[in-house]
Amino acid sequence: MQTISQPVVRVSRHGKIAVVTIDNPPVNALSDTVRASLVQVLPELAEDPTVAAVVLTGQNGQFVAGADIREMSRPPAQPFLPEVVAAIDAMKKPILAAIDGAALGGGLELALACDLRVGTERSRVGLPETKLGVIPGAGGTQRLPRLTGVATALELIGSAKIISGKEALHLGILDALMPEDRMLTDVIALAENTSKRRLSEHDVPCASKTDVQDAEKSTLKRAKGATAVLEAVRVVKAAETEPFAQGLFLEREAFLRLRESDEAKALRYLFLAERATGRLPASEKAQPRHFSRIGIIGGGTMGAGIAVTTADAALNVVIIERDAAAVAACQKRIASLYAKQIETKRITEEEAERRFKKIQISHEWDVLKNVDFVIEAAFESMEVKEDIFRSLNKVVQAHTVVATNTSYLDLDAIAGCAERPENVLGLHFFSPAHIMRLVEVIRGAKTAPDALATAIALGRKIQKLPVVAAVGEGFIGNRIFSHYRKHAEYLMEDGVSPQDIDQAMQSYGFAMGPFAVADLSGLDIAWAMRKRQSATRNPNERYVKIPDMFCEAGRLGRKTGKGWYSYVAASPELDDEACALIEAGRKQAGSRHVKLSAEAIQRRLLAVLANEGAKVLESGVASSASDIDIVFVNGYGFPRIQGGPMFAADKMGLPNVLREVEAAATVGGAGSEPSALLIQLVQSGGSFTAGIT
Ligand code: 3H9
């Protein structure tokens, strides 16, 4: 066997078969150099009379994870990916794709241009470009429908779903699955007897009109207005009516246009930011401790959700409950979470059973002797948590990391009750914990670096996005969100209706506006917080009494049928009582009865979010602006396509943000002043999110 070495693409010969291996760690992304190497190598092999067939594969346990996302913010450089795909399509000899690991985006597009695709059980296949705000740009929108039909192609491309090797085989995207250790050898053996089968020469298989219409309808519904999905639907459907070359032309035009869109820039930024989060600077890095058995104290809604998400990651879990009755109730709660997953076809019954078996529920604290990590998920009360931490001293081992799940309590005070405060940290899960990806990891004053590293490693293991925060009221998310809510209330007291504020934020892309969110979580939560803070509140901070008046009237939100809105009618409405309470509050406060457009409301609330974000950065509670964006996008319904509040502020222009914050400060008083960091960035012409693009 003779091997010609190239930096990122290697060619080896196995008799008459040439194997082209893409080797660009970590995921063999199609960088400039990979593309340049491929357009050089492929025509050479096409012309070489000693080569009968070619096998295209990838190193590092991956095929190819697509175009290089880090390069997508630069002007496109030649050779473009469609040229590489065209070189494969032009091959007169058979060319086969041997796919282990990811064949995503441009990676799958390479494979779709091949004559045969062989995968393994580890293969992960898909065209997830719409998640990055673009559409497949190297033939995927035209070749996939020619293989699977338009309906399936619409669903796969529109949902950006990544499917397993087995599913891909079932859909005909892969032609065969082979064992990983033998796959390449088997594909080489197949190569000589494979005949040419260019999808570009095929017609789109006939499909029922209703199937296509249904797929289009459900794709558009899920899209929630995302431009890339709308474009993908248009271009995939063109495969049915337009010749292949015209389809490619439409695809390329849309891809290049979308690539430069704000939506795509925001989504690329989040892709990279989410991968960077939880990476500690070299000075604070430590090896995580070993963990395989996790203890959870309290099997209520939060504890049960955490248990399920932990068992999903194949870790053993033991939940501690108060007594036998609470154990039984917890058992039921977990069973119903699994039943829901079976019902929605997320997992099979057998899988649910297998995962459930990983969860033990007990009222004997002794079982905690064998755990490596404890998550206390009891009631949010200082006394309760302090008691638990004192009791834990008697059972946990010296290496066991102990986390309290809290959204606002003082971690350092809780750690003060532990014999080993260096093992203590906070984990702020979001509800429902088995679904929401975000988890704030709170580092206490005494938390040891390896305990922190263990919590981050556990977060990643259970498929969460761990964002590190320091101790501070409300950590990152709740602190910033409470300022957003306060300013929404200032606007409301000044004359803007809650409905107009909610609609403005929804039209910006939020899942819900601030008043609808308050109704969902319960107005009494913020009320309790306001009471707690009353002794220390700065008298120069504006205080809006209307929310207290709602609580005093028993309007606590959805759980009481009425909050800001009434939920008695088919759709939520501001009823007479709510209007009267708001008017009474405005009168007492001497309201100015201002009117604002939706854009002005959005500008104000976005500026307030970014300003408080800047203060969180200044105080060291968050270590990067992109961490704040990740928290808001994944925990607070901030629209992903806007990139997060700090990214959005950069886009608004920081001088404009500062002007808006100055205006907000005149109505908010103490606590609403512009942050020193924001002022400094305006003066220096800097930005919050430069560096991650
Ligand atoms: C496209 O293909 C457009 C074409 O249609 C048309 C062009 C004309 N590029 O996620 P992980 C890095 S658009 C560059 O932590 P996992 C990632 O940043 C593209 N880098 O691992 C990280 O690096 P680091 C369509 C990439 O095992 C490391 O790999 N493709 C790329 O949980 C590990 O990543 C996609 O959208 C990339 N394409 O998941 C696929 N992909 O450690 C995007 C990954 O330095 N990728 N990296 O931070 C994924 O979905 C997941 O990364 C994957 C691995 C499933 C592959």
Image (cartoon, rainbow, N blue to C red):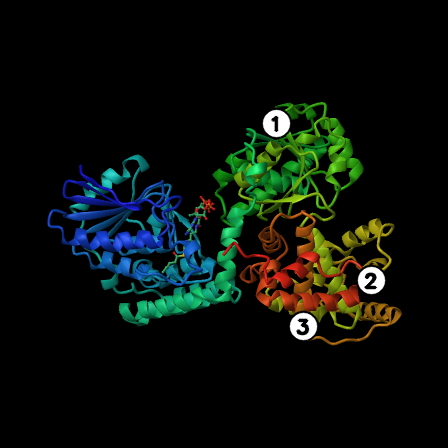
In space, the residues marked 2 and 3 are separated at their CA atoms by: 21 Å
Circle nearer the N terminus (2, 1): 1
Circle nearer the N terminus (2, 3): 2
Nearer to us of marks 1 and 3 is 3
Q: Which mark is residue 542?
A: 2
Q: Amino acid at mark 3?
A: Ala
In space, the residues marked 1 and 3 are separated at their CA atoms by: 53 Å
Q: Quadrant of residue 181?
A: top left
In space, the residues marked 2 and 1 are separated at their CA atoms by: 48 Å
Q: Name above or below for residue 294 compared with residue 493.
A: above
Circle nearer the N terminus (1, 3): 1
User: Is 333 in front, or is 35?
Assistant: 35
Q: Quadrant of residue 590?
A: bottom right
User: Is 93 in front, or is 243?
Assistant: 93
The kind of secondary structure element at disc 2 is loop
The kind of secondary structure element at disc 1 is loop
Q: Hey, which residue is sitting farthest front in the picture?
A: 684
Q: Which mark is residue 333?
A: none
Q: Look at the numbered disc 3 and say if its residue's Cβ is closer than 8 Å to ligand 1.
A: no
Q: Which mark is residue 371?
A: 1
Residue 461 picture location, percent across and down? 53, 38
Badge 2, how many Cα within 10 Å: few under 14, some, many 20+? some
Residue 335 picture location, percent across and down? 59, 40
User: Is 390 in front, or is 577?
Assistant: 390
Badge 1, how many Cα within 10 Å: few under 14, some, many 20+? many
The kind of secondary structure element at disc 3 is helix
Badge 3, how many Cα within 10 Å: few under 14, some, many 20+? few
Disc 3: which residue = 600
Q: Amino acid at mark 1?
A: Val
